């Protein structure tokens, strides 16, 4: 048997652009990205209540906070000021910068911490 058939192919190696169609390249890139997907972390009822209470305290204090949240199969981090909680949509509204607002669902938040003066 030829040595060519005994060689193992690197699974992360893709063909050059002259051998692969653009549609196939997109599908390969989507597949590689999907391998990095994170399953939604599940917090118990006590943890959710504690996060909600803490977030409401930070809204009341107008404190700068660091938030870790899950969205679209990824975990994101953001710093900003918690402005308010929208009861109808069940979302926290976070102002990252003046004019830049982010809406985070109450079930998406994984961790909240207050930023100290030295962290600013």
Image (cartoon, grey):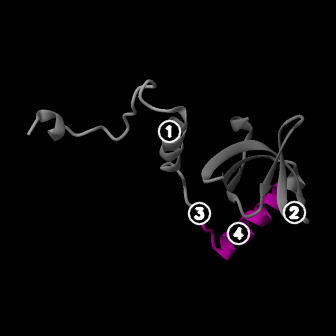
Give the left or right position of residue 66, taking residue 89 as reference. Answer: left
Q: Earlier in the sequence, mark 2 or mark 4?
A: 4
Q: In terms of depth relative to the viewer, which is nearer, 47 or 57?
A: 47
Which of the image's four quarters has the N terminus?
Answer: top left
Indicate the position of residue 14 as horizontal and vertical percent values.
40, 33
Residue at which label 2 appears: 89
Label 2: state its secondary structure.
Answer: loop
Could you tell me how far apart the alpha carbons at marks 2 and 3 are, in whole angstroms?
21 Å
Tell me: 78 left or right of 38.
Answer: right
Residue that carries the numbered disc 4 in the rendered image: 48
Q: Which residue is mark 1?
A: 24
Q: Earlier in the sequence, mark 1 or mark 2?
A: 1
Measure the C-alpha gap from mark 4 to mark 3.
12 Å
- Magenta residues span 40-58
| Residue 41 numbered mark, or none | 3
- Mark 1 touches mark 2? (CB < 8 Å): no
Which badge, 3 or 1, is on the more N-terminal residue? Answer: 1
């Amino acid at each position: 048997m030829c040595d060519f058939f005994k060689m193992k192919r690197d699974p992360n190696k893709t063909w050059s652009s002259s051998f692969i169609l653009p549609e196939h390249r997109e599908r390969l890139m989507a597949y590689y990205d999907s391998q990095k997907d994170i399953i939604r972390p599940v917090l118990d009822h006590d943890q959710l209540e504690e996060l909600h209470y803490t977030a409401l305290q930070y809204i009341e204090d107008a404190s700068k906070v660091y938030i870790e949240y899950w969205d679209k199969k990824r975990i994101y981090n953001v710093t900003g000021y918690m402005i308010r909680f929208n009861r109808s949509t069940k979302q926290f509204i976070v102002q990252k910068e003046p004019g830049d607002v982010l809406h985070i669902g109450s079930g998406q938040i994984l961790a909240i911490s207050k930023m100290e003066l030295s962290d600013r």
